[in-house]
Amino acid sequence: MKLENWQALDDQAVAVARALAMDSVQKVGNGHPGTAMSLAPVAYTLFQRILKHDPANPNWIARDRFILSCGHSSLTLYIQLYFSGYGITLEDLKSFRTFNSLTPGHPEYGHTIGVETTTGPLGQGLANGVGMAMAARYEKGMLDPQNGTDIFDHNIWVLCSDGDLQEGVSAEASSLAGTQQLGNLKVIYDDNRTSIEGDTHLAFTEDVSARYRAYGWNVIEVAAKKDGDVDRDKLETALLAAVNEKDRPVLIRLHTVIAWPAPKASGTAKSHGSALGAEEVAATKIKLGLDPSETFIAPSLVIDHARKIKERGANLYKKWQADFTAWQKSNPQQHELLNRLISNELPQGWDKELPIFPSDKEIATRAASGKVIAAIAKTLPEFWGGSADLAESNNTTIEGGTSFLPASSQIAGANPYGRVMHFGIREHAMAAICNGVALHGLIKPFAGTFLVFSDYMRGAVRLSALMQLPVTYVWTHDSIGLGEDGPTHQPVEHLAALRAIPGLAVVRPADANEVSVCWQQIISDAKPVGLSLSRQNLPVIDRTKYAAATGARKGAYILAYGSDSAKDRCDVILIATGSEVSLAIAAREQLMAENIKARVVSAPSIEWFMNQPENYRNDVLPKNLRARVSIEAGVAQPWYQFIGDAGVAVSLEHFGASASAPVLFKEFGFTVENIVNAAKESIRKANG
């Protein structure tokens, strides 16, 4: 199958795109021109002839998504957004990589219209694409469970590099994509055999095509022309074949020459990440048939021709709108759901079934979270997720949700629209996939593993925070309290390290009822959160004696005053999180028996607390009360800002050991006696 004839103006547009890539980098003095030059015909063909998109409706839910996984080649995308009329101007290209421009060094989600995800850390974009493809299938199940229409069907296109495919996260995600038989995922692999250090065969020699066939992908090879240019006709044939593939993800392995057709820079490592130089830019423009004395060449004839994509997009959208209107009338319930999801609203009373836990039993906060997840799932069909092969330990299985797997899967309970995602032991890809799911727009994803393995997913978690995506990380087994698995599995530095990520809220509830309150806040806020939960059972705090768990919404709250009267003086503040809060309560009782008035503050989330008004923060932690003790089974680094020069930290500044939780807590100083002694020491320091 062939589309309408390729015209001379299209060739000119590709030449202009290559020149704009050179000029943009040359003007600012840094950047990555080579890949943007060689990929110009690829991106142009995609945007002009293949992608289903409408520049006038950039958030159209049925649009194809395009991800530039090799984000360093951001000009590849920016130039096509300029050509297509997404709001980027020639002046924006002239402002490439400068402060506050719409064309930053790497594409940034939410900053530039038409950018579907933030890319740059290699492999992340491809994994995001897997998440988007999975989200598209799940959303289809929510909105069209009988598969009665194609109005929600669309493709996810990813343009990736050798570097993307060397990163482990892409291997994890690609393997899962094959298992999931994601026929809506189309990946173009720019195989130019060039990276910063030179020939990629220095470190990357496997048969990538064979690897992807082993994953279960349809692999299509496209060789370069003899002169090194992209064979655009063969590429377009491959793209159309990819569109027609419905049962497997597609990898188009495209052989290119970086920086083609630069006379000296083509095929060189230098062209990957450096400006070509004025002489080489001029020589390349001559080869492209352009005036070497001109910069930022953008003939109106060429731009007007490229902007005709707006007509094609408008026609596609108009036809879709007619079909969508018919669907609305036939499916009022699903349409109401869609409207709610698009507006990011929650149904009235969605949280009425959230459990309230009695104080007569102990329960691990991971187990409490599992019960809350079940309650949320009853009212929010968009609530979707799973675990990296630890669902039974993380309590992240939605009961009756069935497994998200293709219909052809031989696994019992497989359902292409299932609510339980099995990520396998792929923590990094799990997080990056959940980012893609959230970016797709209608789902609230969650992902579970042990807190110690948050290290494996940190790159993607950082991007969740950078993009402010509503991804919830359910991190269980949150301290030495997990016991006999020992120091390899006992997180010590992880809470501090995660709290260092700007824009990520780390939440460590003290008991089951704080878990319920915190989940309520997480769903309402729709922001990235890491939920830190205990393996071991914890007391459920008796709220008839202590403050209501609703205070957890503010990140920190006064659980118990220094005496029965809130107005009485206080001698010391005990600030604790998670499993250590019950120890703080017991320490308070002993201090009171010695006529020392101790306030207990439960502080499940530093980030939430710091977002509260200053007067509230001062009420919880009065500035004139310098005697303070922080109590958390991890390194104390985050707590010094709260305990000050007179404070004492009861913390863990070394790795754990293999023993039961009670033994470890005793051996490492998490005892009532040690907290009492710390309180007395802090009082002495404050009064000294």
Image (cartoon, rainbow, N blue to C red):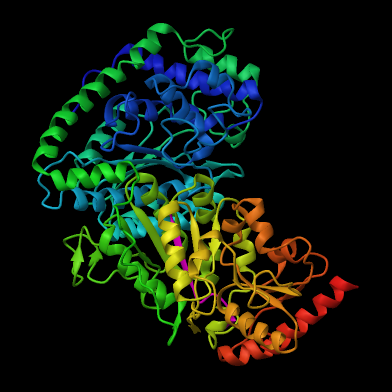
Does the image show residue 534?
A: yes
Q: Is residue 245 left or right of residue 394?
A: left
Membership of 546 in magenta stretch = no
Location of residue 435 in the rendering, given as x and y in whole percent from the top left corner? 42, 51
Figure quadrant of residue 336 = top left
Q: Nearer the viewer, residue 218 or 679?
A: 679
Q: Quadrant of residue 411?
A: bottom left
Residue at (60, 51) in percent of width and height: 502
**Which stretch appears magenta?**
471-480
Q: Is residue 225 visible?
A: no
13 relative to 663, above or below: above
Q: Quadrant of residue 295?
A: top right
Residue 675: x %, y % from top left:
71, 83
Quarter of the picture holding the C terminus: bottom right
Query: Residue 624 location in percent, x, y?
Result: 79, 62
Relative to 51, is 218 above or below?
below
**How many marks overall?**
0
Residue 473 shown in magenta = yes
Q: Viewed as shown, does residue 147 lie left or right of 196?
A: left
Coordinates of residue 217 in the picture (x, y in percent): 29, 53
Considering the image in quadrants, where does the N terminus appear? top left
Q: Along the line of sight, which residue is nearer the eye, 611 or 145?
A: 611
Q: Which residue is rendered at x = 41% and y = 61% of the image?
A: 520
Q: Residue at x 16, y 62 (%)?
A: 408
| Foreground of the two, 619 or 533 | 619
659 on left or right of 475? right
